[in-house]
Image (cartoon, coloured by chain):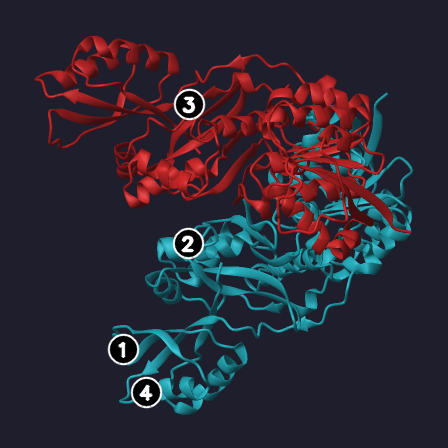
Chain colours: A cyan, B red
Amino acid sequence: MTKSLRLGIAGLGTVGVGVVKIIQRQAQLLSARTGCAITISAVSARSRDKDRGVNLTRYAWEDDPVALAKRHDVDIFVELMGGSDGPAKNATEAALAAGKDVVTANKALLALHGQALAELAEKNGACLRYEAAVAGGIPVIKALTEGLAGNVITRVMGVMNGSCNYILTRMENAGLTYQQAFDEADGLGYLEADPELDVGGIDAAHKLAILAALAFGTRVNFDAVALEGIGAITIEDINRAGDMGYKIKLLGVAQMTGRGLEQRMSPCLVPATSPLGQLEGGTNMVVLEGDAVGQIVLRGAGAGEGPTASAVMADVCDLARGLRLPTFGQSADTLMAAPPASAAGPARYYLRLMLLDKPGALAKVATVLGNNGISIDRMRQYDHPGDDAPVLIVTHKTARPSLDAALADLPATGVLHGDPVALRIEDV
Amino acid sequence: MTKSLRLGIAGLGTVGVGVVKIIQRQAQLLSARTGCAITISAVSARSRDKDRGVNLTRYAWEDDPVALAKRHDVDIFVELMGGSDGPAKNATEAALAAGKDVVTANKALLALHGQALAELAEKNGACLRYEAAVAGGIPVIKALTEGLAGNVITRVMGVMNGSCNYILTRMENAGLTYQQAFDEADGLGYLEADPELDVGGIDAAHKLAILAALAFGTRVNFDAVALEGIGAITIEDINRAGDMGYKIKLLGVAQMTGRGLEQRMSPCLVPATSPLGQLEGGTNMVVLEGDAVGQIVLRGAGAGEGPTASAVMADVCDLARGLRLPTFGQSADTLMAAPPASAAGPARYYLRLMLLDKPGALAKVATVLGNNGISIDRMRQYDHPGDDAPVLIVTHKTARPSLDAALADLPATGVLHGDPVALRIEDV
């Protein structure tokens, strides 16, 4: 006899509709794979009457997602509304409190309330799954939590916001300014209603915080992510980085150090020939490094109806197959509260300065760097039509506090125009 | 109270020692992640006295792996001996018959006896796991079976023999002949005792057959893989393919067609800028394509102590966590016996011919191709110091039977020196 598993889906946007389509289209395949008849009992969304291109008449309708989450004919509550608080959180909590499993694509919810939700899930014997919350269709939660379970994870990296990578790629390939590429991405509907979630790195940092918790057995701590968006990157930076064999990516990096857990999401230079450097357009990439496995690279679509629905269904199928794990791979009470560590470890940096065209200007800059213990690997001064001379500097390995001290000292030289840009060069 | 899980490890080569090291070193981490104390009860290998650099004195020793598999203090039998028959098969069968779970890295065993072993496992309520059998440390079995469970898989591709990719990369980057690169790989210990397993594509085809069964819900059928090794590839081919923007890779491709299941392992041309084209050296890459997820690319070390042991431990941890699935993702009796299909679908081909320096030679070749309905996209004739003129042809999309007919007709023209080389251009 085939078991049955009944879903309640809250949120019928792109991803919700994608999930409905898969369940309607692939009933036989899903049943063969899981041994379960996976069905939908009820749905909920803001507007009941909107034509979504799928037939929803077979399913009960709930205006209130909390009511949906509690229904007796719902075994798994599928939360696809989004938002870190409000209905998404309330309904998720209601489902877990009722002992129902939850599958969600909500990165903000997990990044901000992951620990409390994990504890609530465990207390009630429920599973909370969120493969779709990180890097869309790439099964990275599973790869990290299960596939690399025998490893001490040493570093997690990722380009996990397709919109930012699209903007940076377009700046490079089409010679657009940041604003032009931003407007183009916005016109194509690639950006969130609040674009700062994308270009400010917040969305990607949510994902990084989740991966870090899984990788290092720590309590998810989004507030500790050192966050820097891509708004200050110019086409000049991209071209000059290119001259030196690098690409600029909004890169998330998490690693456990002797000082605590380092989490940062910021524009970095990576070698143009590395898998991260070769990543173009809206595609996502996650790099997982472990003491036994070395480096694993995962690449795929980070958003969109099909890829995100695929990840939601991976979680649903796992639950249908009886594959159950604690929210962050181990019981919530064993997750450590790691102290946040700044990215103080030595790294090479790329500096862009606009130098006033005065005699001795370059010497003054070099002196400030030298006084702060920063040695220069490469320096290029470019032709300049106006009064300012763009100067690019690549440092040798430098501790971040030394760099920060130098950046603080530079304005007093009186030879700079505008603020210097400093980007970390990540060894990947 | 922590549960305990006791392993019996048969085979103490590189991978076996790697597994022992992880279990000895990471006891606390593994226990936190799985809720189980994972220990080793007994081991077995050919030579008891060999110094393997790990302390084995705590473990019982069995000369006979079958006896090891049946021990009452062994919960999971870890088979790392290799070989499709003999002790590996006997001991695996003994363990499964005794209702014990088995974890193996043995691709040949699964490729040749997968269906029977899956049935035996199910009959006895045991799990048979083999993440380490395909693409080393890359968790591709898991990604495909679980991570993409909501997808109709449309195509699986992979570069899954690091030694072949090393040889091809060295030919290209160092200008070595095939034989020189082969000898270098052999000297570095990269090749199996029977190198035909590597360069003949057999090892990679074992892996492809396993992935195909998982992807398409079919009975594993290694004998149906169309197999072609890399021995006929010359530095000329690599350079000329490079001129046209391609790399040559030993590429496995499996896809379900209207005619049946197509499985082939052969040298193919792939775009130099694609992830597969950019793969250098001994690294492996698997590309999974699904109707919802689009294309997922997984990259990592395909062999070696750490990566392979990492994959073995992923399976062990899954079992420790109670994550249990049928051998091929669904119950063995639901796996279809798909008819094997030849790679008859239209594709572009690269042809290399050595033309005798006679008037009208090229016209004769072109006529044969035209008579068989093959149209030419690009053709280049190269300078030639001797009497033979190398001619490179890229065809438009052509059905393989037409190509085969043309290849059969070409010798009768009397203008060829040696056999033509025909390589498929795979759209990746």
Query: Of callouts 4 and 1, which one flags the residue occurring earlier in the amino acid sequence?
Result: 4
In front: A250, or B26? B26
Distance from disc 4 to disc 3, alpha carbons, whole Å, reads 63 Å
Q: Which residue is label 3 attached to? A: B228
Tag 4–tag 2 contact (CB < 8 Å): no
Tag 4–tag 3 contact (CB < 8 Å): no
Tag 2–tag 3 contact (CB < 8 Å): no
Circle 4 or circle 2, nearest the eye? 4
Q: Chain of mark 4?
A: A
Residue B425's place in the image compared with A174, above or below, is above
What type is the residue that disc 2 sits on? Arg
Q: Residues within 10 Å of mark 4 (few under 14, many from 20)?
A: few
Look at 33% across and 26% down and name the residue there: B232
Q: Residue furthest left?
A: B359
What type is the residue that disc 3 sits on? Glu
Look at 20% across and 26% down and name the residue there: B391
**Where is residue B187, by image quadrant?**
top left
Circle 4 or circle 3, nearest the eye? 3
x and y, in percent, of residue A82 in the image? 71, 52
Q: Which residue is label 1 attached to? A: A386
Dot 2 and dot 1 within a common chain: yes
What type is the residue that disc 1 sits on? Gly
What type is the residue that disc 4 sits on? Ala
Q: Chain of mark 3?
A: B
Q: Which residue is label 2 attached to? A: A170
Look at 41% across and 66% down and name the residue there: A234
